[in-house]
Image (cartoon, rainbow, N blue to C red):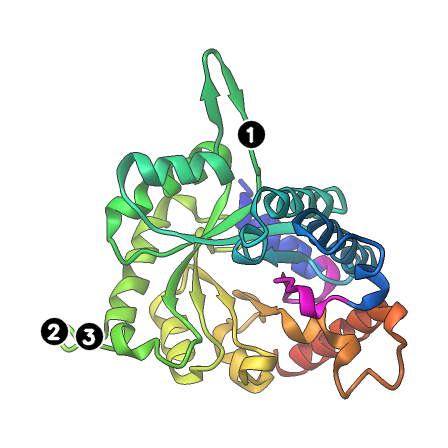
Amino acid sequence: MSNQIDRLIQKIKETNNPTVMGLDPRYDMLPECVTSKYSKDLEGVSKAIVEYNKALIDETYDIIPAIKPQIAFYEMFGTYGMKAFEETCKYAKEKGMIVIADIKRGDIGSTAAGYSNAYLGKTKIADMEHSIFNVDFITVNPYMGTDCVKPFVEDCKKYDKGLFILVKTSNPSSGELQDLKLESGQEIYKRVAQLVETWGADLIGENGYSSVAAVVGATYPKQLEELRALAPHTFFLIPGYGAQGGKAKDIAFGFDKNGIGGIVNASRSLMCAYKSDKWKDQFEEKDYAKATRAEAIRMRDELNSVL
């Protein structure tokens, strides 16, 4: 029976594109043609973000299978920002896109359950259950152990949702902790990958991958290749492409022999394509969404050339 990871894989196949567009809007990223319409306060900025995000979604929903809004860039604008996050997620789902909420939650017991209720499950009030953000996947930090992951996994089973669990992240200092060796000689990130395989064993779909998936950075291709072999049922969300320096040839290590097994995140390179040297001479500011589409097609073709 198909599950959430199968639906993501199907969207990737339909669009022929293993790309997820990170929607991490900062005010200084937004073009003046959008910001000039709104007041320079929390409410106005949040409205500008919604317009910007919707324009990017409108221009790419047929060629990009998923979005990944990073919660920090919405929380920073308070309740108005969270409303923008909610609108963005809902709009993308209406357009048929998969929504991966990048929230990186990690706590234990009832606190973890509360986070999971908000994004994956339901919040019960009296005799009524309410879906709050109702996204498809969330990101989770597992470094408090099984206690902090279990409530999310249970909701994945109950509500047919998915997780991307941090295993080997793309940031420069990730090795300070993740590369440390245990008494056995195994690195911590490899042990976490094994745990992810265990946590997701009951959620393996028709394509052989589990809805309990992993975050593995493109900036560490050797580790990406090792983890693909070590965790054969674990689907990868691969950040670090583009602005962080990850190359398409490196990303290929995260995919299996059939060219599936991962989805590659790009945020700034897609969101700010209209400012980039590649596209700024071809697109006016008002055509920012068309520049994003052009960069999405270029990225798609580059990724497919190595898969």
Residue 79, which numbered label? none
- Callout in the foreground (1, 2): 1
- Do the residues under discs 1 and 3 have CB atoms within 8 angstroms? no
- The part of the chain drawn in magenta is 14-30
Q: CA distance from mark 1 to mark 2?
A: 44 Å
Residue 131, which numbered label? 1
**Of marks 1 and 2, which one's residue comes earlier in the chain?**
1
What's under tag 1, amino acid-wise?
Answer: Ser
Residue 184, which numbered label? 2
- The x, y position of residue 33, in whole percent, is 86, 64
- The x, y position of residue 202, in whole percent, is 37, 43
Q: Quadrant of residue 154?
A: top left
Residue at the (64%, 73%) spot, across then down? 268
Residue picked out by circle 3: 186
Disc 3 is placed on an element classified as loop
Q: Is residue 244 visible?
A: yes
Q: Is residue 120 visible?
A: no
What's under tag 2, amino acid-wise?
Answer: Ser
Q: Nearer the viewer, residue 223 or 130?
A: 130
Rendered view: 271 above or below 233 = below
